[in-house]
Image (spheres, rainbow, N blue to C red):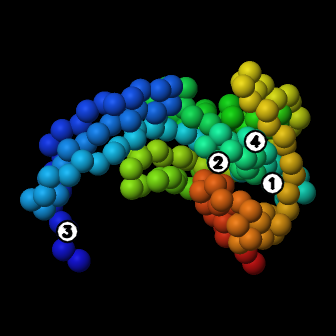
Amino acid sequence: MDQIPVKRLDRILKYEGSILKIYEDTVDANGHLAHWDFIHHKGAAAVVPVTKDGNLLMVRQYRNALDRYTLEVPAGALDSPEEPKLDCAHRELEEETGYKTEKQKMEFLIRVNTTVAFCDEVIDIFVARDLEPSRQNLDEDEYIEVEEWAVKDLEEKIYQGEITDGKTIAAILAYARKYCVN
């Protein structure tokens, strides 16, 4: 397949929030001037917490963009672009679930670009085992319920359209493929 030459001519910041920066890019796409939206995300990490019984700890939380509660793997944005993703995943595990483990017991699973058409967000997903009870440390605007699920039940929820979060789908299916397939 031949690649169409695309050259960015300009990038203008239109909005800056705590996690995102939204830009308008002007590009030359094969001789045609176009304006494309681009969202820069500072990065994030997620974790698949595995209980001693082989179940996964999931978090149920309200998502304003969807105006509903979702069932997801624990995740969060980096505190800074320089923060190691493993540190972020380790922090988010305890903050959101109230469980912790040692960093060296966390294993990299998969890297996900969430929405490649207009956003550069990258989420590294880790597996956490040997969980020990701790306590949740939620942000003041967060309310998160922690639920324990069997992997096969989560897979069913994905295929029934009940779990639609991309990072969660990628995390569960990658985990199931790597650790649950005989």
Q: Which residue is mark 2?
A: 66
Residues at circles 3 and 2 in contact by the CB criterion of under 8 Å = no
**Is 148 placed left or right of 126 in the picture?**
right
Q: Secondary structure at mark 3?
A: loop
Query: Disc number at residue 3?
Result: 3
Q: Amino acid at mark 2?
A: Leu
Q: Can you see residue 148?
A: yes
Q: Which numbered mark, 2 or 1, is in the foreground of this view?
A: 2
Can you name the residue that lies furthest to the front here? 67
Q: Amino acid at mark 4?
A: Gln
Q: Which numbered mark, 3 or 4, is in the foreground of this view?
A: 4
Q: Earlier in the sequence, mark 2 or mark 4?
A: 4
Q: Which residue is mark 1?
A: 56
x, y percent for residue 128: 73, 46
Residue at 65%, 40% (x, y): give it.
64
Q: Earlier in the sequence, mark 2 or mark 1?
A: 1
Q: Nearer the viewer, residue 166 or 178?
A: 166
Residue at 64%, 55% (x, y): give it.
165
Q: Which numbered mark, 1 or 3, is in the foreground of this view?
A: 3
Query: Disc number at residue 77?
Result: none
x, y percent for residue 153: 83, 66
Q: Earlier in the sequence, mark 3 or mark 4?
A: 3
Residue 132 in which image quadrant: top right
Residue at 50%, 52% (x, y): give it.
114
Q: Which residue is mark 4?
A: 61
Q: CA distance from mark 3 to mark 4?
A: 41 Å
